[in-house]
Amino acid sequence: MNKSELVDAIAKDTKLTKVDSAKALQATISAITKSLKKGDRVALIGFGTFSVAKRAARTGRNPQTGKAIKIAAKKVAKFKAGAALSKSVK
């Protein structure tokens, strides 16, 4: 499912227009993004938790040449599925 298909599904389930559904989805994504940028967690009970994790700097290998390369430290977004979501996927 891509973003436009998700907007269609939201519109169908909520009886909102596709424009309003797209605005609601964009507002949700924006709120989650802003929270993660601040370093906060976003917990949606039954769905899952978005968080930020720090990856340490490390040495990797270029697969074409085998030469060692340095990979810089960075922050990455993580998602952990909640119990209800995990159970429904099984």
Image (cartoon, grey):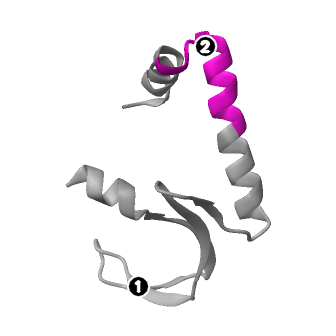
Q: Is residue 75 above or below residue 19?
A: below
| Number of numbered discs visible in the structure rendering | 2
Separation of marks 2 and 1 at Cα, in angstroms = 49 Å
The verdict on residue 76 being magenta is no
Callout 1 secondary element: strand
Q: Quadrant of residue 23?
A: top right
In what element is the residue under mark 2? Answer: loop
Q: Nearer the viewer, residue 79 or 90?
A: 90
Q: Amino acid at mark 1?
A: Gly
The one nearer the camera, 83 or 27, is: 83
Q: Which residues are magenta?
A: 13-27
Q: Which x, y percent locates residue 9?
A: 44, 22
Q: Nearer the viewer, residue 66 or 32?
A: 32
Q: Give above or below for 42 relative to 31.
A: below
Q: Residue furthest left?
A: 90
- The structure residue drawn at horizontal position 43% and vertical position 62%, both measured from the top left corner, is 82
Residue corresponding to mark 2: 16
Q: Is residue 25 magenta?
A: yes
- The spot of residue 35 in percent (x, y) is 75, 59
Q: Is residue 85 above or below residue 7?
A: below
Q: Position of residue 62 (x, y in %)?
A: 36, 76
Q: Is residue 60 above or below residue 42?
A: below
Question: Which quadrant of the figure has residue 65?
Answer: bottom left
Q: Disc 2 or disc 1, which is closer to the eye?
A: 2
